[in-house]
Amino acid sequence: QQQVKQSPQSLIVQKGGISIINCAYENTAFDYFPWYQQFPGKGPALLIAIRPDVSEKKEGRFTISFNKSAKQFSLHIMDSQPGDSATYFCAASTSGTYKYIFGTGTRLKVLA
Amino acid sequence: KAGVTQTPRYLIKTRGQQVTLSCSPISGHRSVSWYQQTPGQGLQFLFEYFSETQRNKGNFPGRFSGRQFSNSRSEMNVSTLELGDSALYLCASSWETGPGTEAFFGQGTRLTVV
């Protein structure tokens, strides 16, 4: 019940295309869902995060869509660029803690 | 503003030894959490500290321990190292424990056990 399932494991997208990464969770106590971006040799960096009281959040080219009833959330990267090539992790936690349960990661490659 | 600083960046140890990793959080941050990242298991939560108190602990053996000092700096210790402890150890700091406050990660300490 503590798992966060992430798909796909890897993704190849053409420059300018839309990258979509999906995550699903079971624990309904989760109420904070961040997405992290990680480049090789670096620590994860927060991209965008959402709470269950909204169904969508957009920041620049990055959008989170959240479906509370289905217990699913997804990251959309619009106009994908080669510089977006990285590994993306979804995560979930409950209020008052930084005990994040991370998904297994998606390796994104954007072709120039 | 300096980010989360982890030292050392790289470490090679022999099986059976012990190791101590250090994390200096962003100035003013009081919460520090630790994660282990491996290709096989991904990012796994180790423990979380707030104001020198351990608030949460992940499913790791007792060989893994940590502490937080009054200046919020944190250390984690792994005793009797095993080959499987080879991983990137990441520290994250946060301002407070309120909902939706983000965690900032350091670059990690790459531990290799030989």
Image: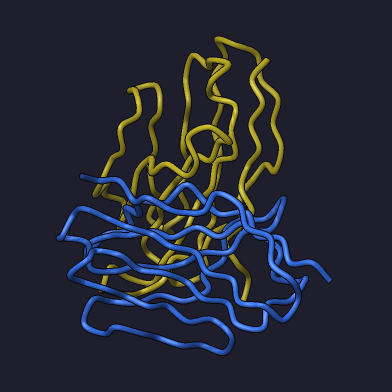
Residue B27, compared with residue B58, is above or below; it is below
Q: Position of residue A36 (x, y in %)?
A: 51, 64
Residue B104, compared with residue B6, is above or below; it is below
Answer with left or right where residue B37 lies relative to residue B67.
right
Q: Nearer the viewer, residue B98 or A60?
A: A60
Colour assignment, chain A: blue
Q: Position of residue A44 (x, y in %)?
A: 57, 59
The residue located at (40%, 75%) in the rendering is A49
Q: Nearer the viewer, residue A66 or B110?
A: A66
Q: Count how many numbered circles sit on residues in the image.
A: 0
Answer with left or right where residue A75 lies relative to residue B17.
left
The residue located at (32%, 70%) in the rendering is B96
Residue A111, compared with residue B12, is above or below; it is below
Location of residue A51 by image quarter? bottom left
Which quadrant: the C terminus of chain A?
Answer: bottom right
Q: Position of residue B76 (x, y in %)?
A: 46, 37
Q: Position of residue B2 (x, y in %)?
A: 63, 70
Q: Nearer the viewer, residue A68 or A96?
A: A68
Coloration mode? by chain
- Furthest toward the top, the residue is B16
Residue B39, compared with residue B53, is above or below; it is above
Location of residue B51 by image quarter? bottom left
Answer with left or right where residue A92 lies relative to residue B29.
left
Indicate the chain coloured yellow by its letter: B
The residue located at (51%, 76%) in the rendering is A76
The residue located at (35%, 54%) in the rendering is A100
